[in-house]
Structure formats: structure tokens, C-alpha cells
Amino acid sequence: METLTKEQVVERLEHAREQIQALGIRRIALFGSVVRGEARADSDVDFLVEFDPARKTFRNFMALSFFLETLFEKRVELVTTESLSPFIGPHILREAEDVLLAA
């Protein structure tokens, strides 16, 4: 397994922009070890995602999760702002860096 950098994540997301936006994604932000530059080869990739309200479905959420795991060849953790706990959510929101925004 390779160790991913933030720059590699951004590059791969940009190349897959059309497929990602087809799932109704408005925004993807990166947080966790990759954004902090602390990722190891076995690290997962953590994303905070925002869907277009009309496209926010369980099917699209799962499709995005599977798509990103294939794209990065790693385990991916997806969270939405609505799913953040009041305890860890503020930390994630402070750390998150936008890596893909809807055009």
C-alpha cells in the first residue's frame, strides 16, 4: 500500500470530478492523518462530504464510498456534517480542508 499525500488525493479527485459530481456531491473536504501529513501506508482516508439536498440518498452515499475506496485503493471513512458528533465534530470541522468543490 502506498502512503498518500494531500496533493495526491486532490489530483485523483480532480481526475474523477465528473463521476463524483454525478453522485450529487457539492463538496469534499479532507481531514485526519492525510491532511496533517501523518498518514502511513495502512492509514485510511477521511472525508467530510456535502451532498446536493435533492441527491442526498443512502445509495449515493454508499456509491461514493465504494468509488473512493476503488480510486484510492484504501479504506475510506465518509462523514457528513449532519452525522458529526458534538464531541468530535468541532475538531473535524477545524481540521477539514476542501479538496473538491462543485463547479
Image: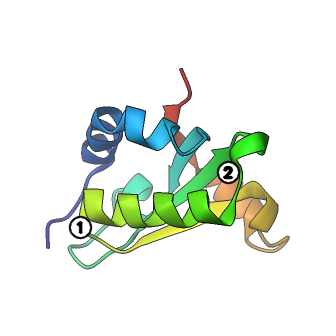
Quadrant of the rendered image containing residue 87: bottom right
Q: Is residue 25 above or below residue 60?
A: above
User: Tag 1: Cα neighbours inside 10 Å, few (<14), some, or many (≥20)?
Assistant: few
**Amino acid type for the residue under numbered disc 2:** Arg
Q: Secondary structure at mark 1?
A: loop
Q: Nearer the viewer, residue 2 or 72?
A: 72
Q: Nearer the viewer, residue 80 or 51?
A: 51
x 37%, y 72%: residue: 44
Which mark identifies residue 94? 2
Quadrant of the rendered image containing residue 23: top right
Inter-mark Cα distance, 2 to 1? 27 Å
Q: Secondary structure at mark 2?
A: helix
x 80%, y 73%: residue: 85
**Amino acid type for the residue under numbered disc 1:** Glu
Spot occupied by residue 89 in the image (x, y as percentages of width and height): 75, 65
Quadrant of the rendered image containing residue 24: top right
x 58%, y 57%: residue: 60
89 relative to 44 in the view: left or right: right
Spot occupied by residue 13 in the image (x, y as percentages of width and height): 35, 41
User: Which quadrant of the rendered structure holds the N terminus?
Assistant: bottom left
Check if mark 2's residue and mark 1's residue have beta carbons within 8 Å: no
Instruction: Tell me, yes or no, if residue 32 can be seen here.
Output: no
Count of residue discs: 2
User: Tag 2: Cα neighbours inside 10 Å, few (<14), some, or many (≥20)?
Assistant: few
* Marks 2 and 1, the one that precedes in the sequence: 1
Q: Nearer the viewer, residue 100 or 98?
A: 100
16 relative to 88 in the view: left or right: left
Instruction: Tell me, yes or no, if residue 81 can be seen here.
Output: yes
The residue labelled by disc 1 is 73
Spot occupied by residue 7 in the image (x, y as percentages of width and height): 28, 41
